[in-house]
């Protein structure tokens, strides 16, 4: 039935199932049974509507042979899937009057996009809602398309897979690719949860933090994030999970299958560790000099928070209120760079920044070489070497330019709505656009709706990589115009 039904119906059905999963927490916390309707009502509604759409539209969505039309249709479908997920995911927060609709949608957007900025007071939030937030991030790390492909596929599957921002196929068959990613993701979740428990964390906290660290999400069950545990083993486990989550799934497969030499040659992975090697000592010495930390504590704080920013996870080890401007500036830079393409991370992506820097260096070199000399640059992916040619550089520049324009506009709007300094606005909006979740203190239960809306726009554009959103909105407007024209 589901193979031949509308993609919209499939996503509505799947979203209903995902929103019902937090009900599994109730046997462990029976005092929270009164909150059950907040989850099973939207879940049942979404499943029922999904089945109705499948019944009314038994044939799968039309697929055009024209690439542009197909891409537009896929982008619109992806945008619908995420929009529906955000709407249904927000419902539990509203049903028990814990958040208003703007706050609830913000929390849902932050969850599904794996951002981690929050307006909830976790100290008084029931376990079922804390699990709901964490589970949204865990599923959002994979994405709705990949989640659906673990269950069922259709004719549009490949177009949708590419449209959601998954560049690599790990296996010749798309279903096997989804299964391979799902198995790795699930395996790392189990290993991370066990590691947290061994390190001294309770089982519920271990599961929630493992889901959020692996998805580079950053929601925590503690008010002061990972820093509240004040535990070196817990911080070490978190760093490892964050780096796993920010690594391309294709590279992870090389590592899991023992092809470490091939994985070590991947430019993106080498670049990530280079950034950490360069910037962690700078942040550490800034903290040591300005905050009077010891050498060990300075490097411990610097490694954790720099890795959190670069991986776009958003866990923090301490408040940033007293951090020196140099350290804050480096965190902003790391949040803009982001993690690996084809991973759960956000930001510009390591590969794009690497390609851009190689192109800049090649341009500089060209000015010192004879006019007729020919230069050829390559970068290494999990599948092999790829030439850095003019079209690739143009695509990279187009995305980086669009991203930076959004960052500048969003930052300026934040200074107006949040009445904050430019540095604070840059930090907070870099966190939203990069789906990071680190906060300098602007986002919380008292944050005004205008600021939350600006951050939500940044989170969605950042998670779906800008052009998918623009193409989807354009396709939707075009479809509406055609409908009314008839």
Image (tube, rainbow, N blue to C red):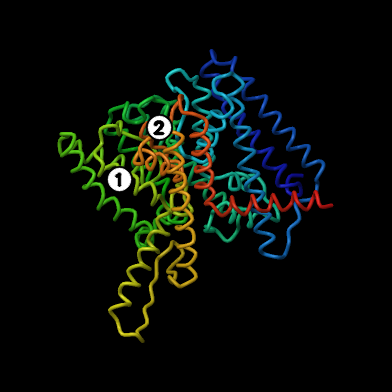
Nearest the eye: 187 or 82: 82
Query: Marks 1 and 2, Cα distance to the nearest angstrom?
Result: 17 Å
Q: Residue at x 65, y 58 (%)?
A: 71
Residue 308 visible, this angle: yes
* Mark toward the start of the polypeptide (1 vs 2): 1
Nearest the eye: 334 or 262: 334
Residue 212 to residue 174: above or below:
above
Instruction: State the residue position of label 2.
Output: 442
Residue 329: image tag? 1
Spot the residue most to the top. 31
Describe residue 349's horizontal placement relative to residue 327 as left or right: right
Residue 301 to residue 257: above or below:
above
Nearest the eye: 285 or 143: 285
Q: Quadrant of the N terminus?
A: top right
Number of residues whose C-alpha sits closer than 10 Å to that of mark 1, classed few (under 14), some (14–19) or many (20 or more): some
Q: Residue at x 58, y 48 (%)?
A: 146
Q: Position of residue 352 (x, y in %)?
A: 42, 59
- Identify the element where label 2 is drawn: loop
Number of residues whose C-alpha sits closer than 10 Å to that of mark 2, classed few (under 14), some (14–19) or many (20 or more): many
Residue 188 visible, this angle: no
Describe residue 76's horizontal placement relative to residue 420 as left or right: right
């Amino acid at each position: 039935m589901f193979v031949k039904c509308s993609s919209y119906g499939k996503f509505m059905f799947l979203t209903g199932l995902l929103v019902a999963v937090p009900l599994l927490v109730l046997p462990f916390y029976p005092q929270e049974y009164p909150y059950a309707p907040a989850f099973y009502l939207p879940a049942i509604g979404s499943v029922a509507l999904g089945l109705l759409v499948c019944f009314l539209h038994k044939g799968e969505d039309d697929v055009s042979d024209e690439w542009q039309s197909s891409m537009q249709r896929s982008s619109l479908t992806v945008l619908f899937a995420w929009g529906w997920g955000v709407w249904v995911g927000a419902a539990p927060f509203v049903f028990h009057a814990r958040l208003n609709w703007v706050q609830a949608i913000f929390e849902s957007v932050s969850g599904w996009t794996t951002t981690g900025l929050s307006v909830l007071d976790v100290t008084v939030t029931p376990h079922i809602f804390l699990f709901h937030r964490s589970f949204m991030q865990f599923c959002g790390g994979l994405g709705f398309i990949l989640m659906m492909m673990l269950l069922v596929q259709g004719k549009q599957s490949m177009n949708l897979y590419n449209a959601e921002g998954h560049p690599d196929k790990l296996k010749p068959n798309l279903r096997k690719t989804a299964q391979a990613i799902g198995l790795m993701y699930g395996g790392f979740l189990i290993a991370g949860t066990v590691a947290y428990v061994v390190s001294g964390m309770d089982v519920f906290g271990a599961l929630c933090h493992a889901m959020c660290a692996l998805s580079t999400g950053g929601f925590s069950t503690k008010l002061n994030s990972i820093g509240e545990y004040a535990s070196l083993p817990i911080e070490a486990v978190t760093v490892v999970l964050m780096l796993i989550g920010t690594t391309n799934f294709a590279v992870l497969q090389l590592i899991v299958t023992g092809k470490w030499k091939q994985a070590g040659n991947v430019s993106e992975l080498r670049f990530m560790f280079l950034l950490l090697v360069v910037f962690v000592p700078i942040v550490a010495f800034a903290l040591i000099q300005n905050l009077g930390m010891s050498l060990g504590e300075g490097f411990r704080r610097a490694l954790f928070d720099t890795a959190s920013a670069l991986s776009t996870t958003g866990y923090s080890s301490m408040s940033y209120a007293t951090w020196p401007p140099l350290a804050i500036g480096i965190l902003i830079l790391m949040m803009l760079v982001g993690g690996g393409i084809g991973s759960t991370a956000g930001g510009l992506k390591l590969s794009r920044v690497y390609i851009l820097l190689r192109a800049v260096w090649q341009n500089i070199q060209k000015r010192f070489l004879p006019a007729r000399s020919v230069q050829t640059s390559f970068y290494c992916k999990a599948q092999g070497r790829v030439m850095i040619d003019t079209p690739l550089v143009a695509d990279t520049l187009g995305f980086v330019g669009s991203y930076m324009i959004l960052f500048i506009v969003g930052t300026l709007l934040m200074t107006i709505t949040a009445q904050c300094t430019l540095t604070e606005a840059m930090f907070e909006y870099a966190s939203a656009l990069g789906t990071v979740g680190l906060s300098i203190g602007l986002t919380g239960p008292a944050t005004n709706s205008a600021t939350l809306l600006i951050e939500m726009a940044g989170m969605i554009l950042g998670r779906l990589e800008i052009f998918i959103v623009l193409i989807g909105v354009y396709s939707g407007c075009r479809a509406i115009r055609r409908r009314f024209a008839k």
